[in-house]
Amino acid sequence: MEPSLQKELLEATQLKGITLKEVLPDTLYTKVAAWFSANAGMELRQLHSFSPMVVMTVVMAVTQQKYFPNKPGEVQLDDYFQQQGRKQGKKVRGLETMEVQINALFRQMSLQRQVVLLNELFGQQSLQEMIGVMNNAYVSQDMNKLRQLMFEGSYTPGELKVLLTDRNVAWMRQLPGLMKEHSLFVAVGALHLVGEVGLVEALRGLGYTVEPVKLRGANVL
């Protein structure tokens, strides 16, 4: 990430003229602070200058690493493919800018809406169970379950449009032209594949044949 993008990300995730303790209701702050003390190896006050969405992101990452850690030497899937592409001398490029991601994740929702989502995150089933369900659906390539988890969850249709649909549409403006130039390996988040607005159906709608590929005994799209 370029230094200029780091600055932009920091500005988008920081609170302005207020602290996290002032933003969150007392009962929610107490619950989240207790969770951080018990699970994260840090105190919530260390995130006082950041938005509730950042807190949610950290909570999910900590839970993932605590209960479903990477094995020694493992890297994240997207990092792996980028590393392999560069090793083989292939051109590696993004389908969107960091600014698009920042807007989708951190700028589209009001502080009040972020507080609601954080409260819902801590008000449902255990975080370990929730992450476990997501991981199992991903590893087993259960696209319907992944879609259900996202589209029947807490996000509104408008929020999902910004997070998924609008980005899919933007990518589909690029992919046909790129595929005419040369063969591609395209890696996207699993939720961008599913549903009527997903990339699989969008490509099929343009006449492309999209089939699962057999890989080490598993059917993956």
Image (tube, rainbow, N blue to C red):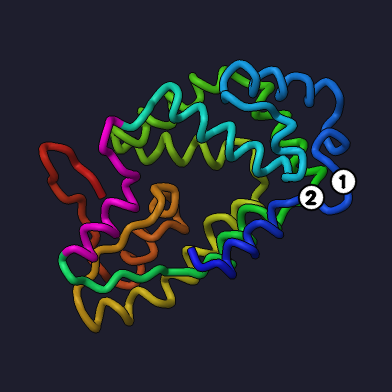
Membership of 72 in magenta stretch: yes
Residue 64 located left or right of residue 11: left
In the image, residue 187 sits, relative to residue 37, either above or below, namely below
- In this view of the protein, which residue sits in the foreground, 135 or 5? 5
- In this view of the protein, which residue sits in the foreground, 73 or 139? 73
Q: CA distance from mark 2 to mark 1?
A: 6 Å
Rendering quarter of residue 69: top left
Residue 188 located left or right of residue 148: left
Q: Which residues are magenta?
A: 71-87
Residue 33 located left or right of residue 100: right
- Residue 183: x %, y % from top left: 19, 73
- Residue 70: x %, y % from top left: 33, 32
Residue 112 located left or right of residue 98: right
Q: Which residue is mark 2?
A: 15
Identify which amino acid the numbered label 1 is placed on: Ile
Label 2 packing within 10 angstroms: few (<14), some (14-19), many (20+): some
Q: Which residue is mark 1?
A: 18
Membership of 78 in magenta stretch: yes
